[in-house]
């Protein structure tokens, strides 16, 4: 507990602790803390863009139909459901954490041949996770809404180097943000596997990065395909990631 | 020359009718890599990197001016507001609760609203700040996505359900003097912002003849323009909310003993991605968009004519040289035919085009081409950067002049009633002088058969100007015109 307090104190002392909003799990950022966090976010974006990622922007409401493409890979219980005021049955989810499903309709127009791969995209927007009214909610541990950089790499099906590339990129980013003590765990979620970079404080894990290896499962369901050199129809692999707000709060950027 | 959409066989010109303009916009927003409306639900668009960079540039211009001229600060707000707080706002806006998105974040019976308007959120925050003793004035703005459950037709960037970007600000002032100054500064912001974008606009005040308007605000100031199809479009709004929302959210100043409850004076400002849609249509033609060099994230499109190593290397050399001089460029390498790549560059509206072939490499002379407006210019390799900088300013001037000329051509000021009827019948934005009596306004409205757009903002009428209807001394200028379908 003492260490947890120390961490939050450290964030407050660095003047980038956001203000508490009147809904639990939500915060708002004003001038000073916003400036600090934006500066770091820009640096993180620059690092990713240097690796060939391009910045897109997607709608924040994800229709149920789109999320269903993920099937058993994800659990909808973790995401915040939204319906329209007029037709209460229309069901959306608000930008779900880590899986980057909002990109799929556009990706289907961008990938036509193997020449379009790898497609590296990212988006800097808030992401949402359903936490509920747990007692332990604080800025580092499960805010409902947080700054995040989500993204994905769509690569040729035969390409096995994507995971290596993303892992080394993640390590490099954490190193640049002076977060040297971190662990990596491989977790299973439904039929998908994901890798989590975390730092441990006060016997709890503070998530830094999440990497989802979605193989070609999602592209099959979303009907995203390409033709290889032999003109065969192939489904690309999708590898999605999310760099959490905690990197920006805890990290100190070094050149 | 008219371009055709091969899929739909629709002729693409930037529009003599509203539908033509919409078709043109829909086609080139994708071809020009701005946004794509292909999504699993209606009224939502995904932004391509090029379009995203353009809108980011526009938003950064707006933020800079609003901070500098009107003393605003940025705030990033959560995406949810409590249902109860939101419903307080709904007392002033009819049916608003049906046009937003709701969510049971914590419990099924405890509903929250997804990014409705800034008033509901900042109203609650301002009230808290005042209780904590934080001193007024408060001037905050935010840029975010907003959910609007539009049931009618949706047009990308124009009218959407997932509205991004939505730029909105809310101020709270202590005295009427400060409040009027805040509104004045916001008007200055509007003027400077649209001037920087090269968009001629009129700043008008909406007359208080609409019931709906009276419910929501004390006064509404708008930046309007007219599109090529002779339709009036509202680009930005300033709402004088007076005490309406400070009463609703309890933003109370306890400063006077005699008046224990005096309320803060609140105003709101806002615009959306529609600004970009209108900007694109203003300079667009049958080949696509034309971006101003001051806004475009890519100033020069370098097109290698053939797929050869020497040409590729020369293109890279030019790119490095220009980037060093601060001129952003992109190589459109040969993964498709030269004609196709040229079409893409033109559709994107990249201001300058540089073709690289063997002839250019041998002679060392390049031709800087633009989409339109200025003549191509031949230049030596060493003089590329300074010439491009000079041409940028020249193109910018030409574009602004063209926009003003087009705008003036669609604005008319009639001498008599006959001319007035004729101009409004032909769809022009028509300005007439009126005495201020309700009868004359009603007569002008019935004669014109079009809508009252607004009155000239902040300008007192000159002497010796007479009411076009009753010939008595005129007190105000009123604009008449046709708005876009569904425009409120």
Image (cartoon, coloured by chain):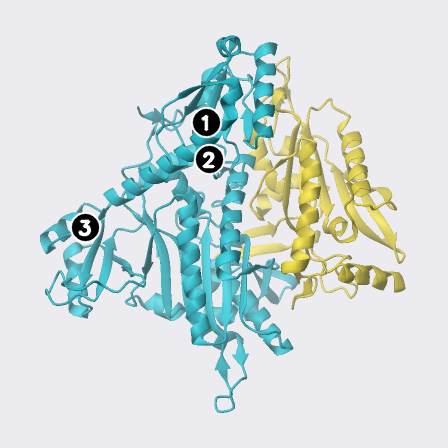
Chain colours: A yellow, B cyan
Q: What's the mark number on residue A118?
A: none
Residue B478 in the image: x percent, y percent?
A: 23, 60
Query: In the figure, is residue B58 to the left or right of A56?
Result: left
Residue B331 in the image: x percent, y percent?
A: 55, 23
Asked if residue B363 is positioned above or below residue A150 in the image, the reply reads above
Relative to the observer, which residue lies in front, B211 or A177?
Answer: A177
Q: Quadrant of the C terminus of chain A?
A: top right
Residue with the most extreme bottom position: B258
Query: In the figure, is residue B59 to the left or right of B408?
Result: right
Q: Are marks 3 and 2 on the same chain?
A: yes
Relative to the observer, which residue lies in front, B232 or B194?
Answer: B194
**Mark 2, other Cα within 10 Å: few <14 / some 14–19 / many ≥20:** many
Question: What separation in Å lies between label 1 and label 3 (alpha carbons)?
Answer: 39 Å
Q: Are marks 1 and 3 on the same chain?
A: yes
- Residue at image coords 69%, 24%: A156
Q: Which residue is mark 1?
A: B352
- Residue at image coords 23%, 55%: B480
Question: What separation in Å lies between label 1 and label 2 (alpha carbons)?
Answer: 8 Å
Q: Which chain is indicated by disc 3?
A: B
Residue B420 in the image: x percent, y percent?
A: 14, 53
Q: Which residue is mark 2?
A: B293
**Mark 3, other Cα within 10 Å: few <14 / some 14–19 / many ≥20:** many
Q: Which chain is indicated by disc 2?
A: B
* Dot 1 or dot 3, earlier in sequence: 1
Q: Which residue is mark 3?
A: B424
Q: Which tag is nearer the camera, tag 1 or tag 3?
A: 1
Q: Secondary structure at mark 1?
A: strand
Quick check: marks 1 and 2 in contact, CB under 8 Å?
yes
**Mark 1, other Cα within 10 Å: few <14 / some 14–19 / many ≥20:** many
Q: Secondary structure at mark 2?
A: loop
- Residue at image coords 17%, 67%: B435
């Amino acid at each position: 507990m003492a260490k947890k307090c120390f961490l939050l104190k450290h964030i407050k002392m660095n003047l980038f602790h956001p203000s508490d909003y009147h809904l639990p799990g939500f915060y708002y950022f004003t001038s000073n803390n916003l400036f600090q966090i934006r500066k770091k976010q820009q640096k993180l974006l620059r690092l990713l863009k240097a690796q060939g990622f391009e910045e897109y922007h997607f709608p924040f409401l994800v229709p149920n139909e789109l999320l269903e493409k993920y099937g058993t890979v994800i659990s909808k219980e973790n995401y915040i459901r939204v319906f329209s005021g007029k037709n209460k049955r229309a069901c959306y989810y608000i930008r779900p954490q880590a899986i980057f499903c909002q990109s799929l309709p556009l990706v289907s127009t961008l990938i036509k041949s193997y020449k379009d791969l790898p497609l590296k995209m990212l988006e800097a927007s808030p992401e949402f996770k359903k936490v509920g009214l747990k007692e332990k909610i604080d800025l580092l541990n499960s805010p409902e809404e947080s700054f995040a950089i989500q993204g994905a790499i769509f690569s040729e099906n035969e390409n096995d180097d994507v995971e290596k590339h993303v892992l080394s990129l993640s390590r490099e980013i954490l190193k640049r943000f002076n977060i040297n003590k971190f662990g990596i765990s491989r977790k299973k979620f439904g039929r998908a596997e994901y890798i989590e970079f975390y730092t441990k404080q006060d016997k709890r894990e503070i998530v830094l990065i999440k990497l989802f290896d979605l193989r070609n499962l999602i592209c099959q369901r979303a009907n995203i395909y390409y033709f290889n050199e032999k003109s065969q129809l192939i489904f690309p692999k999708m590898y999605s990631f999310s760099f959490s707000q905690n990197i920006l709060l805890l990290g100190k950027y070094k050149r | 020359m008219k371009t055709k959409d091969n899929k739909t066989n629709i002729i693409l010109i930037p529009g003599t009718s509203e539908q033509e303009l919409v078709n043109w916009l829909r086609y080139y927003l994708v071809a020009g890599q701005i946004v794509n409306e292909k999504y699993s639900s209606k009224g939502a668009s995904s932004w391509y990197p090029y379009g995203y960079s353009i809108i980011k540039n526009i938003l950064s211009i707006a933020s800079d001016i609003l901070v500098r001229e009107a003393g605003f600060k940025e705030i990033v707000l959560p995406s949810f507001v409590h249902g109860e707080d939101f419903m307080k706002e709904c007392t002033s806006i009819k049916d608003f609760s049906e046009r937003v998105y709701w969510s049971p974040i914590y419990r099924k019976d405890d509903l929250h609203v997804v990014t409705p308007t800034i008033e509901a959120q900042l109203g609650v925050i301002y009230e808290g700040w005042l209780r904590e003793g934080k001193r007024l004035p408060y001037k905050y703005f935010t840029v975010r996505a907003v959910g609007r459950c539009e049931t009618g037709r949706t047009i990308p960037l124009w009218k959407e359900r997932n509205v991004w970007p939505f730029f909105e600000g809310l101020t709270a002032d202590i005295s009427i003097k400060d409040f009027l100054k805040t509104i004045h500064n916001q008007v200055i912001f509007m003027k400077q912002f649209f001037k920087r974008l090269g968009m001629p606009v009129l700043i008008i005040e909406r007359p208080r003849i609409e019931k709906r308007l009276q419910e929501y605000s004390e006064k509404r100031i708008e930046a309007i323009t007219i599109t090529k199809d002779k339709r009036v479009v509202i680009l930005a709004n300033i709402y004088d909310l007076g005490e309406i929302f400070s009463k609703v959210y309890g933003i109370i100043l306890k400063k006077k003993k005699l008046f224990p409850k005096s309320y803060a004076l609140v105003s709101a400002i806002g615009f959306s991605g529609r600004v970009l849609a209108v900007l694109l249509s203003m300079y667009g033609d049958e080949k696509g968009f034309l971006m101003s060099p001051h806004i475009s994230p890519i100033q020069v499109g370098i097109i290698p004519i053939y797929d050869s190593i020497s040409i590729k290397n020369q293109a890279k050399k030019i790119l490095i040289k220009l980037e060093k001089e601060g001129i952003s460029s992109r190589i459109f390498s040969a993964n498709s035919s030269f004609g196709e790549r040229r079409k893409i560059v033109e559709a994107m509206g990249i201001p300058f085009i540089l073709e690289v072939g063997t002839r250019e490499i041998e002679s060392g002379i390049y031709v800087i081409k633009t989409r339109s407006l200025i003549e191509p210019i031949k230049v030596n390799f060493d003089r590329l950067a300074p010439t491009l900088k000079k041409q940028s300013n020249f193109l910018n001037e030409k574009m602004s002049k063209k926009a003003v000329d087009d705008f003036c051509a669609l604005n008319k000021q009639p001498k008599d009633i006959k001319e007035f009827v004729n101009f409004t019948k032909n769809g022009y934005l028509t300005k007439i002088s009126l005495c201020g009596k309700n009868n004359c306004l009603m007569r002008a409205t019935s004669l014109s058969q079009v809508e009252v757009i607004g009155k000239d903002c902040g300008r007192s009428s000159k002497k010796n100007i007479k009411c076009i209807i009753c010939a008595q001394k005129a007190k105000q200028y009123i604009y008449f015109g046709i708005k876009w379908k569904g425009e409120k």
